[in-house]
Amino acid sequence: MAVEACNKQKVMADDMDDDDVPLVFKRSSSSSKPNQSNSEIKKSVPQKHDQQLGRSPASNARPPNGQNNFVQRSKMVPSSRTPPDRSPLMSPKLSSSPTKGLAVKPTMVDSKPSTSKAAELNSDKRQIKGENSLNVSSRPKEESEDSEDDKPLSARLHAGGSKFNSGNANKGANVSNFGQTSKIPKSEDSDDEIPLSSKFRVKAVAGGSAKRFSTSDKKPLLAECGQNGSASTDRKPSAVLKKRNVDSEKPTDTSLKRPKLCETSTLHKNKESSVKAEMEEEDEEDHIPISQRIKKTAVAEKKSAQVKKFTKPTTPITKFNQKPKKFIKNSKYSESSKVHPSSGDGQKWTTLVHNGVIFPPPYKPHGVKMLYKGKPVDLTSEQEEVATMFAVMLGTEYMDKPKFKENFMDDWRKILGKNHIIQSLEHCDFTPIYDWHLSEKEKKKQMTTEEKKALKEEKLQQEEKYMWAILDGVKEKVGNFRVEPPGLFRGRGEHPKMGKLKRRIQPSDITINIGKDAPIPLCPIPGQSWKEIRHDNTVTWLAFWNDPINPKEFKYVFLAASSTLKGQSDKEKYEKARLLKDYIQGIRAAYTKDFTSKDPTKKQISVATYLIDKLALRAGNEKDDDEADTVGCCTLKVENVEPVPPNILKFDFLGKDSIRYQNEVEVEVAVFRAIQEFRNKKKDGDDIFDKLDTSKLNAHLKELMPGLTAKVFRTYNASITLDDMVAIICNHQRTVSKSHSAQMTRLNEKIDELKNILEELRTDLARAKKGKPPLKGSDGKSKRNLNPDALEKKISQTTAKIEKMERDKDTKEDLKTVALGTSKINYLDPRITVAWCKRHEVPIEKIFNKSLLAKFAWAMDVKPSFRF
DNA sequence: AATAGGACTTGCCGGAAGCAGC
DNA sequence: GCTGCTTCCGGCAAGTCCTATT
């Protein structure tokens, strides 16, 4: 059992719930400490408690989860080493004592098949009784306490509380869950007419979560909670421009410039005045972002009505007596502008002004001659350009890939012409160009700081005008305004098109999307013109061109992640994931029931959903032959999943970006049997889920919850877990850094060195106690004669140093292939982190870097009491 | 229902910038 | 100030999922 990992969860949960405790970094002592958390939750949000922390029968519904094995594999850490309570996303800035055992790759598993026959029978019985078809853990209590395999993901990660939760504390919650769950039809046919989504919304009408929605969904966050979590009443924008806080205190920082009204647009001016009028009328709308207030059209209202359908019914707020407290006052990021759901009919904006895109500079020939059969060859500028693209890749692993070279040669040959002297890549020697490239790189490196700065300044000046767009009167950063330069396509994994020439994109390739009344951006290349100008306000892209590698695909220019538009959809994403929380019990109950369905499609859907929920698998769309051969859930092949009796599934496949997913998971017996059946009479390369594709799966999920798709499970599970483990769950990996082993060796050497010093110090101490002088050091030099106290101090310092280094080493090893950043950016609801920071007076800047602060501006004014 | 087209999010990587230890 | 490491950040590939069309 991974005491460390679990305790961390528990402490975190404690902290999140306990808003009244003073700012103390607790140490998670041990699993013996009962879960004292959630007093508040217990009082007001029973379901939440059991879902997130405990193991009520309902949450036991969470099938044995493979991730648990990650937890199990995590190393145990003596409590003395346990780091202080960390923020959900503690960054190294705050945490100088990294923890062991927080990250283990999902590879091999020391799984212990703990689902006994008896348990299985019990489980079956319960299902028959209809008591709670969700349950998976009906095995004897002791066993289930010892093995975490059958705990819900979230509960297992909160294992510190699991024992506790299996006891009385959770009973209330259990009862309510049973009650609600029992509403789920027992017979498949009995209520087919009832929309599934309404059946499954088990929590929507009761408990704290409904309460939560009733407040936060109806009213913008800022309105309910000011900077300090207090109700905000007197917050009037001083001007029409309500800039986001993020930049309001950094006016000089261009990189953080924030939405500003564009004074140049008469169109906007008109809008502004209407906004002003509105604001005077309605103080209550202070929280509405400028862009939204500007619109406030019937369209918007219509959409918000649509959105409402997806939100929970309003129920009265009972308590949740969060004291508005003590949020760091000096944090610049304590609040943000409000973001509203996108307006209706697919309309994304009303006015849009921008300057188009910037093109890479034309190619400058270097004139360095490559060799063919040992002799220098003359190349035209165009030929040389492509040769250089290849030359600079010498030394990369692409050079070992025949496909890369073949594709390159095919495309280069077209430019060389049929009768060119260069006929075969084998006789080409690109080293002269490669060497030139290296020397250029070196030159650049050798530039003085001044020169570098000047260069940067110049670039900035050229690009400044492309960096910003004005969307509905608000100045927003553009994400990727630079047109992709030509190059060789670097597909990942065994991509069939790797090495192909990605030709230069011309203005005539580019379609511009811009407001009707906005000036059309000048084409920056003289004599040329844009392919097309559109005024489509149902999309968010500013420009696109066809991907030269795959012409049926597009490359888009969008606003930056920090923009209101992106923030808005980000928020919607998390809201959807939160909504899933209220349906998840029902959904799990439904798929569990269908594991044994006679309808083969139903059966496959249920097993696939189970895997997506449990393992955070991606949906798995069909892929063309001209893409890398990777799979997701719906496209898993027979060879990717090996059933190992009695109930283990061994997964081994290449997922997104050709990242290998290897995992052994203990699953429910019914799932195990279903997988065996699906594989039956099929070949290695055949689809396991032959009756299924992502659209069928998602169509089914939508019946269970409005807007539900496969990927929501990833957001849901990551956010609800909000733990260091999430990077592992989602299999976000990075390649081991090239210098990793060297770094490890260095660390080991340093540790050894320190250990030698420690030994010497101990010898010296013993001698000093006897009044003898210290021995000569290992370097032969004589040492100062220190008294025993001083020596003891040195010993403890050195010991501490060694311990820290050991910890660093372990963390480095554990995290070498784990990309936590991806989770942080895409899956963890930032409001969880912001709320945590508010409760603990931790400046949010310690957790989120500049980019994330900008991206998550919409989340900054969350209540300290926010729970996912 | 299947397929194609289109729009958007997710995710890895590598270079630049920043920072700590010497 | 230098070195070596970490973090940031942009680039762009590779996913998901929706809608329109056949």
Image (cartoon, coloured by chain):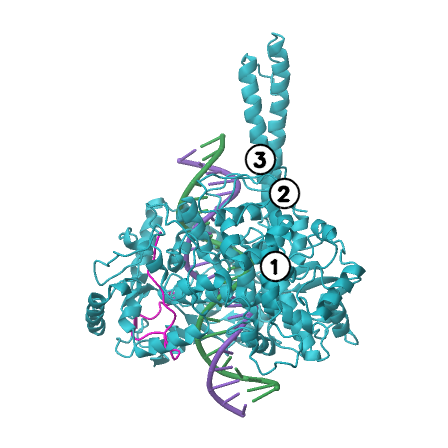
Chain colours: A cyan, B green, C purple
Same chain for the residues under marks 2 and 1 in the image: yes
Instruction: Tell me the distance, in whole angstroms, between the alpha carbons under discs 2 and 1.
Output: 22 Å
Name the element at disc 1.
helix
Residue name at image x 57 percent, y 41 percent: A28
Q: As rendered, which of A654 and A166 lies closer to the eye?
A: A166
Mark 2 neighbour class, 10 Å CA radius: few under 14, some 14 to 19, many 20 or more: some
Mark 2: which amino acid? Ser
Mark 3 neighbour class, 10 Å CA radius: few under 14, some 14 to 19, many 20 or more: some
Residue furthest to the top in view is: A771
Q: Chain of mark 1?
A: A
Return the disc, 3 or 1, that comes first in the chain's sequence.
1
Residue name at image x 45 percent, y 62 percent: A211
Q: Is residue C10 left or right of residue A468?
A: right
**Which span is picked out in magenta?**
A334-361
Dominant secondary structure (helix, strand or loop) of the stretch shown in magenta: loop
Pair 2/3: label in front: 2
Mark 1 neighbour class, 10 Å CA radius: few under 14, some 14 to 19, many 20 or more: many
Percent position (x, y) of residue A588?
A: 62, 67
Name the residue that disc number 2 marks.
A31
Percent position (x, y) of residue A128?
A: 73, 70
Mark 1: which amino acid? Asn
**Magenta-span inclusion, residue A127:** no
